[in-house]
Amino acid sequence: MALNFYGMLAGRRAPAGEFPIAVAVSGGADSMALMLLLREHLQSNRIKTPLMAVTVDHQLRAESSREAQEVGHICAKHGGITHLTKVCEWHTDKEAAGRDGAEKGSLRFVKPREGKMEEQARLYRYGLLKQVCKEHRVRCLFVAHNLGDQLETTLFRLGRASGINGLAGIANQVPFFTLDEPELKIQGQKPAEDVKLVRPLLSVTKDQLIETCKRFQQTWIHDPSNDDLVYDRVRIREVRMVDLIV
């Protein structure tokens, strides 16, 4: 499977010591395939831009730390990838938390109940990914949402009676956040551009990504929470598209 990374990576080169390109890697087939495709693109086109893989250990399952280490070993095996793990440190005192579950003044969240776990974990994950982008001057963060995720999002928003914009689904590239660096302005240097969140796999199926992993002779990690019907997205995944046709 070939993806056109040229437009996505245009102008993303950086001086030594910086990681303008990062990819969020849980260890699942989707993110593993994306990481290996990015590495292949950079190496086959002799692009010397370094690639960083970031794994967020949510600390919600006993196996999560071991799985994050396994992703690191996989990166080392393939070469050309720097791996970094960020760990969620859940706060247990609900009285110290704001309305959204985040502890005031820090990047910590109250450990969620089952009903809110998926959303709180997502907020914490993206908070840590944003932190990595700031620390390593990442310009472009790749995430592995695929065609199935796109359909699930549309169904999810349909169930919540979202407007036209909501039903448009997931965008393939959006601004993640603006990197505000006042110290660079003081020194007369040009600040870094906005950090982009890029989803190049929205037209790619899960089966194609599994076949991509097999092409690279790479196994992947299965997260059992992806099969747990307590989560909204898992229940939506069980809905067949044919059942929606009247």
Image: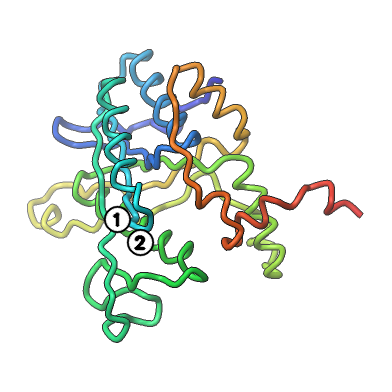
Specify the quadrant that holds the C terminus: bottom right
Question: Is residue 2 left or right of 76 when viewed as pictured?
Answer: right
Rendered image: mark on residue 98? none
Closest to the observer, 235 or 30: 235
The residue type indicated by label 2 comes to: Tyr
Rendered image: mark on residue 128? 1
Please rate how many residues cluster around mark 1, counting C-alpha atoms within 10 Å: few if below 14, some from 14 to 19, many from 20: many
Q: In which quarter of the image is residue 203?
A: top right
The residue type indicated by label 1 comes to: Leu
Mark 2–mark 1 contact, CB under 8 Å?
yes
Residue at figure coordinates x 34%, y 52% from the top left: 62
Please rate how many residues cluster around mark 2, counting C-alpha atoms within 10 Å: few if below 14, some from 14 to 19, many from 20: many
Residue at figure coordinates x 67%, y 56% from the top left: 236
Vertical placement of residue 246 versus 139, above or below = below
Q: Quadrant of residue 8?
A: top left
Closest to the observer, 111 or 196: 111
- Label tally: 2
Callout 1 secondary element: helix
Rendered image: mark on residue 124? 2
Question: Is residue 239 left or right of 221 when viewed as pictured?
Answer: right
Residue at figure coordinates x 35%, y 70% from the top left: 111
Q: CA separation, marks 2 and 1?
A: 6 Å
Vertical placement of residue 218 versus 59, above or below = above
| Residue at the right extreme of this rendering | 246
Closest to the observer, 236 or 154: 236
| Residue at the front extreme of this rendering | 62
Callout 2 secondary element: helix
Vertical placement of residue 85 versus 95, above or below = above
| Residue at the bottom extreme of this rendering | 95
- Horizontal and vertical percent position of residue 192: 24, 47
- Horizontal and vertical percent position of residue 110: 33, 73
- Horizontal and vertical percent position of residue 211: 56, 22
